[in-house]
Structures are given as C-alpha cells and as structure tokens.
Image: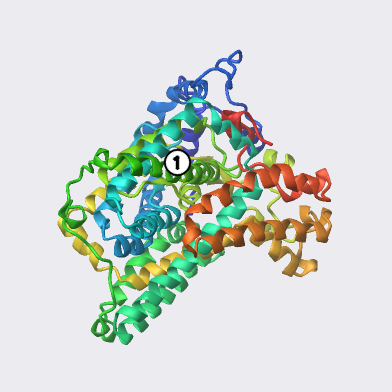
Amino acid sequence: MATTTNDDALQNTSSSADPDSAQPSTTPTLRDLKTKKRPSHSPNINWVEKLASGIILDIRARAPYYVKDWTDAWNYRVVPATALIFFANVLPGIAFSLDLIETTQQYGVAEVLLSSFMAAFIFSVFGAQPLTIAGVTGPITVFNKTIFRIIQGQPDAPNYLHFVGWVYLWAAIIHWITAILNWCNFLKYVTLFSCDTFGFYVSWVYLQYGVQVVTRQLDSSSLPGAFVSIILAILMLVVSFLFQSLSQKTLFHRHIRRFLADYGMPISLIATSGMAYWGTFNSANPQTLPISGAFQPANNRSWLVPFWQLEGKWVGIALPFGIILWILFFFDHNVSSLMAQGSEFPLRKPPGFHYDFFLLGITTFLAGLLGIPAPNGLIPQAPIHTTSLLVMGRPTKKDDEEGQSSNLDEKTPDYIAEYREQPVGVVEQRVSNLAQGSLCLVLLSGPFLHVLNLIPRGVLAGLFWFMGADALQGNGITQKILYFLRDKKSTPKDEPLRRVRKSRILLFIAIQLIAFGATFAITQTIAAIGFPVIIMALIPIRTLLVPRLPFTAEELAILDGPTASPFTMESVGGSL
C-alpha cells in the first residue's frame, strides 16, 4: 500500500511499453494510459468460434514483455512490495486454515505454505498477469470444510483427500474447457457493482475470522491467555492504522512517510508479537500458531494423494462439487485479477485472463494431487500488491491543464498542492510475487517454522481486523454510505454522486447489501457449499435486473462502471 517517487523507476515503467526499444519512451499522462489500446495481433480471428484463440492472443500479447518483466524488477519498489505482500498473504492464509486444520485433521501449516509457494511460482514465472497474488483464501477453506462435513455424515464415507482430489480434478478440467472456449470473455459483464459487493463480503469475512480467532481461545485456553490475545489484537490493529495515518499526513520528511507506508504493517506485526513475550504477557502464555514437521504433511502421509483409488460412485458425486468450485474460482480469481489491474493503476503491459485461467486449472489439479488447499486470486492482497508497486510523481503543468490533478480540493493550500503526488507508473515485474512465494517455502524449514510458532494468534486476529477494515475504507459501498453521512458543506461540488437522486443511490446500495447479506448468511450454514452460486449471480443481477429498475443511463454510469481500464478489458472483448 506504499508508494514512492523514483525517476529511474518511472523510466523503467515507461520503457516497458516498447520491449524492443532500448531507450525509455516519453512518460504518458494518466489520460493517455486510460485510453491506451491493446495491440491488435489478429483482428480477423473470431474469438468465439476459434478454440483457444483467447489463450493464443494472451501469449502473443504478453510474450514480448517477458524479459522486461524480470529486468524491470531492478527497482526499490520491489523490496517493500515483497515484504508487505508476504505478511499479508502467508499469515492470513494460515489463520484462515486453522479451522480447516482442526476440523478435518487432514491439513497442516506445511500444506498451506506449499500451496502459496506453488501458486506464486507458477503465476510469477509462467503467468500473463504476475501482479495477481494467489494463495489460500477464506472461501476455499469454507468450501473444503463443508465438503468434509457432508461426506463424513455418510455411512460409507470415502477417504477425504481422495474425494477432494477428484473434486479438484473435475474443477481443473472445467477450468481448461473455460479457457479453451474463451468463456473468460464473460468478464466484460463484471463491473464495480459485482467487485464492490464481493469485496465487501471478503472484508467482512476478514473481520469475522479475526473475531473467531479470539473467541476460539476463550473456549480452549486459560482466561489470562485469552485476554492477552485480545489486547494484542487491538494493539496490532491500532498500531497498523497509526502507521498508515502518519504516512498520509504532512508530518516528517516524505521519505520517512513512505517508509512508514512501506513497512508499517510488518513492523506492527513484529513489534506486537514481541509484546507477547514481555513481562506479565509472557506468563499468561497466549496461544501461538501451530506448526508441523519441516516439509512434512499432516498425519505423516505421503505428499502424493492416490485419488484414482476412489470408489466409482464417489467419482461421479465429486462432479457437482467440482462445478461449484469452478464457479467460485471463475469469479474470485478473475475479479482478483481485475482489481489488481484496476483503472486507478497506470499499467502499460497487456493482461491475459484466458491464459491465466488455464494455469489456474493446472494449480487446482496439482493441489488435488498433493493434498493441499487449492490456491486462487486473493482479495484484498492482489490490489494491495499493485498499490505497493506504484511510482508516484508530482503533477506537471500539462497534467493540470488536462484535469489530471482533480483529486486536489479547491481549498487545498498551494504549498500542499505543489507537493501532492499522483500515480505515474507501476513497476510491472515478476520478482516480488516469486520472492514472497519463495519465502513461504523457506518457512517450511525447521528454524523458520520455530519462528512462525512464536507468532501469537491474537496478533493474527489484529491483522485480520486491519486488512478487513482497510479494505472496507476503499470499498465502493462504503464510499456511497459515507456520502450520506458526510456534511454536505464538506462534500466537493464536483462530487459525481450529487448528480444522482438520493433514492436511486439508496436503491443501488440496498441491492448490493442484500446480495452481500445472502452470501454472508449462507456461509454460516451447512448450505455454505452453494455460496459461489450466489456470488456468480451478481453478474446477471447487474446485467439483467438493475437496468430494468428506475435508473437513468447517467445515474448508472455514475453509480457503476468498469473495474479496469479499456486497455485491460480489451483482453476479454471490452466492457459492459
């Protein structure tokens, strides 16, 4: 979530637009980037009728940039991005899996870490969208845990990992079919309506899991240890937001503010964890993260799961579960990729949704073969990763004339406006994703597992609260709600929502909140296995239902919009 000004970085990112040129090109303005077109490699190809044409176009578009993806990593922005996303990925992934580990007894910390490494390696080395962070998410842990509860209730329950292996195989096959038939083109119908609603749901899942991490200790540990965990959770939350707030003020030198933005969360986590071993807190013995043997799977099983030994009838029963998993990953992973390449980021390299979804099928199949949770795109980690790679610069007079500094309030003092910075580039590379995944593999070694075991669970609860609350701050639903609560005299005169009737804003928010409530409610029941269907239903709700409601075209254009720029959406045939 941190940014910096770096002239060399700006030259690197601007030169990425032309992989064959050794000289950096003139840096385009934000307006230029938002209207930039993806090169048309084969305009005569029919994307619907020609099999795998989407994959082929993705590879052709991205291949010329492959070497630049590695050389562009010679930039300081990669260091804080790696540190930030490592902590934001691995620790929530482990915490999400605690309930799955304790419920099924089939997974351990090693499985979670291996899953994160596998996803990072494949998508950073072979992927077309290396900025997208993939790993173990809350939805997949809910999915796997629900499968366990369903099959364990059967009198002739099959081997759990064998059954999940077939679920993953069916899902992988459908992933491959989806990519070959260019079904990712349906992403053109995914707008901010769907992304904001799903992001709102994920944010509340983070907040909920933080509460669960704390309350679970009230039942299973000593009361003093539970109280210390609560204190550590609150301390982690407060200190993280304190660093974030200081990084956004005008206090201190700008390099200090950027250091706080870059490393505020990791410093908060390390410092708060250290507090657990200070004085009375140490004697309370708060619960810490569980660990297993170095590079050892749970229950001393083999890393290879012979799922082909599953009884025939259960192979067929696994198919509908595989379809549901495909629905979840189609929406979750692709929305993560869209948000990581949102319109607010001045990206210069083309995307590749079809090709990356084919790769996701490979990681899903390998997850079933190895007996690990299947990884997919992470929210909010994916957009956080891109944000941490932003290169900031001061607006030029040309930008001001073109309206690029509209984020400055009319009342902003001149001495602040002069130093206000805006995104001018992104360090688009593969190293930060690969590095954070490699650190997950390092954690599997004995000494680092011991370090992992020192982290109190209360600190993880605070991390959940911070990431959930931080994601809520920037969510479109939250912004619309705050619009109603904000003093109208303090609302900018050029605020677009001023041109929308209040009743229509409330109606739009109500539809999103109903969809969020339905998704959140079903995940609390045994029917949680079907929650991906509700999530996917957001797309037809927006395209078929919302336009029939009393909104004008102008109002819908203000209330909703494409998630990514036309340059990014061209990979899937444009936007709605």
Q: Is residue 174 visible?
A: yes
- What is the crowding at mark 1: few (fewer than 14 residues within 10 Å), some, or many (at least 20)? many
Residue 467, position in %: x, y?
47, 62
Give coordinates of residue 302: x percent, y percent: 17, 47
Q: Nearer the viewer, residue 301 or 136?
A: 301
Per the image, the residue denoted by label 1 is 131
> Horizontally, is 496 left or right of 317 in the view?
right
- Where is 563 relative to 483, above or below? above
Quadrant of the image occupied by residue 133: top left
Classify mark 1: helix, strand or loop: loop
Instruction: Decide which of 419, 349 is in the foreground and name it.
Output: 349
In this view, 301 is above or below 249: above
Q: Is residue 73 visible?
A: no
Q: Quadrant of residue 67?
A: top left
Residue at 75%, 66% (x, y): give it: 484
Residue shown at 57% from the left, 61% from the top: 472
The answer to which quarter of the image holds residue 157 is bottom left
Q: Nearer the viewer, residue 568 or 346?
A: 568
**Residue 488 in the image: x percent, y percent?**
79, 67
| Total numbered labels | 1
Residue found at the far front of this picture: 155
Q: Residue at x 48, y 45 (%)?
A: 324
Figure colour scheme: rainbow
| Residue 550 % position (x, y) | 84, 51
The residue drawn where x is 70% and y is 64% is 481
What residue type is disc 1 on? Leu
Image quadrant holding the C terminus, namely top right
Q: Is residue 371 left or right of residue 536?
A: left
